[in-house]
Amino acid sequence: MRRSRKSGLVAYGSRDWFRRIGEIVLSLGSPQFYEELIDVFGCLIDHDACWVICFSDPAPPEVMFTRNVPQALRDHYTNACSAVDPFAAHWRLHKEVGVRTLSKFKGMLAAIDARQYNDIFKPAADISDEMGLFLPTIGASSIGLFLERQKGDFNKDELGRAKAAFPILSGLARAHIGQLFDGLRQGDESLSNDQIGAQPILVQDRCGVEIFSSASWKNSVEQEPDLANAIQLDEREAPILLGSFVLNVARIDKYFPLAPGGRMLTLTRCPTDLQDKEVASRRMELMRCLTPRERDVFSLIFSGCSTSEISRALSLSKGSAKNVTLRIYKKSQCRSKIELIRKYSH
């Protein structure tokens, strides 16, 4: 039986909480960063075990760190459960950062089926619920921080605490990535693929000049003849479907140390199934027709959010959220949320 860490809990916003935040700043850019970050997350919410997992399109979920988890259970997850993990399916479908619990997947509009995962993982892990916090990393990937509970579901108050802490934890994760890239700028050769990732990455400054490109990016340029033209011609933050890859484009904020105000471009593999590739192509074509605000609303619709939830998440009035949704329907030639999800889901 794993022991609860309830005795180590601190109140969100308390002096102890901000002391923990201050301490983790010292680990920015280090290999231990995510281990310490999940401890800060876990000190807010009673739990029995925790996991840190990397999610990305081209690879299965990768377990990076666990606490109070037997090695046999880690192996069971990797070998039998990762392929049906609803959290992984959620990331592949939505690319949505934020907080989710396992118990809530049954109500999602996008119909991610958690039954098989519940049948084969929950009994083996001896848990009743999981809470996952998805952090932005590099390109189409995310680091997930997971808390597990043996008895009872995570309640509304605990979910609220996690959502309140998310902007701070997400900001720390972004600062960590910034430190890693700053090390690259200064020629630190000790940075491993485990820290930066093996995903093809290109970083450009605000004028489009290359600042950094990974070895895997250079190899991909040789394999994909249309990639060079796509980089030069596109200025939008919408994915582009090429022959073998999907090109993801993201604007870098002005505080990112490697290329303030520049762009980060990453590559993920195209779906191999013809039907999935057709849906992906249709979805990307729509993304390129949507404004940034419309893309935000589109993502929230796919997460199962109501108009009220969309308005709260984006600080819009309900009327504005509804108007944006109607514009998305018009551009996609759909008449409802259900029709939109069916048309653009894998």
Image: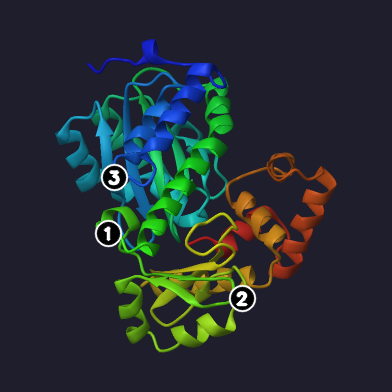
**Where residue 36 sits in the image (x, y, percent)?**
35, 33
Q: Look at 34% across and 57% down and name the residue there.
A: 196
What's the distance in space between the residues labelled 2 and 3, CA to CA? 34 Å
The answer to which of marks 3 and 1 sits earlier in the sequence is 3
Tell me the quarter of the image containing the N terminus. top left
**Where residue 342 sits in the image (x, y, percent)?**
57, 59
Q: Amino acid at mark 2?
A: Glu
**Where residue 106 sits in the image (x, y, percent)?**
49, 37
> SS for tag 3?
loop
Q: Residues within 10 Å of mark 3 (few under 14, many from 20)?
A: few
What's the distance in space between the residues labelled 2 and 1, CA to CA? 28 Å
**Where residue 55 sits in the image (x, y, percent)?**
37, 51
Q: Which residue is mark 2?
A: 235
Q: Which residue is mark 1?
A: 193
Colouring chosen for the image of the structure: rainbow
> SS for tag 1?
helix
Q: Which residue is mark 3?
A: 31
> SS for tag 2?
loop
Query: Image quadrant of residue 167?
Result: top right
- Left/right of residue 282 with respect to residue 144 in the rendered view: right
